[in-house]
Amino acid sequence: MSDSSGTDPPILNYADPNVDSYVVIAHFRDEAEARMAAGALEVNEIGSLVGDRIPSYGIGRRSADLAVLLDDVADAVEILKQTPAARYLASNLEDE
């Protein structure tokens, strides 16, 4: 669809699934713990996303995943290994 000037609207960067590849590096019991870990990463200039998951039983605390850009995985894991969040690191990342 074009606008009245005859040019196509710009393509938004989030429309391309290859723009930023995020990897889930930790699974937390609740969102508050995930946000604290995200804060530790932010202090070290590593951006992250916290995504909550609805518990299967439908009540209680919501668990949450912490994801970082693919290029930041190794640094983020090293930082979180030095915090209480280390116990929530995804099992496939513990040896990195």
Image (spheres, rainbow, N blue to C red):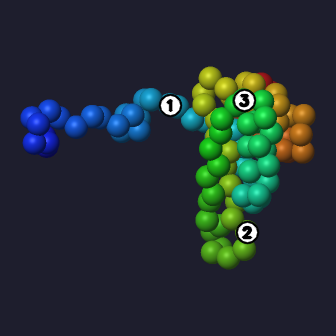
Residue annotated with mark 2: 61
Using the numbered discs, state the Cα–Cα distance from disc 2 to disc 1 in whole angstroms. Answer: 29 Å
Q: Nearer the viewer, mark 1 or mark 3?
A: 3
In the figure, residue 16 lies in which quadrant?
top left
Which amino acid type is marked by label 1? Asp
The crowding category of the residue bearing disc 1, from other C-alpha atoms within 10 Å (few below 14, some 14 to 19, many at least 20), is few
Q: Residue at x 73, y 43 (%)?
A: 38
Which amino acid type is marked by label 3? Glu
Q: Secondary structure at mark 1?
A: loop
Using the numbered discs, state the Cα–Cα distance from disc 1 to disc 3 in whole angstroms. Answer: 17 Å
Q: Nearer the viewer, mark 2 or mark 3?
A: 3
Q: Give the vertical position of 36 relative to 46 (above or below).
A: below
| Residue, far front | 5
Q: How many marks?
A: 3
Residue 62 in the image, given as x and y percentages of width and height: 69, 65
Give the left or right position of residue 82, taking residue 63 as reference.
right
Q: Secondary structure at mark 2?
A: loop
Mark 2 vs mark 1: which is more N-terminal?
1
Query: From where the camera sits, is residue 77 visible?
Result: no
Q: Give the vertical position of 65 relative to 72 (above or below).
A: below
In the figure, residue 94 lies in which quadrant?
top right
Q: Secondary structure at mark 3?
A: loop
Mark 1 vs mark 3: which is more N-terminal?
1
Residue 36 in the image, given as x and y percentages of width and height: 79, 49
Q: Nearer the viewer, mark 2 or mark 1?
A: 1
Q: Residue at x 68, y 55 (%)?
A: 64
Residue annotated with mark 1: 20
Using the numbered discs, state the Cα–Cα distance from disc 2 to disc 3 in whole angstroms. Answer: 29 Å
Q: Which mark is residue 45?
A: 3
Which amino acid type is marked by label 2? Arg
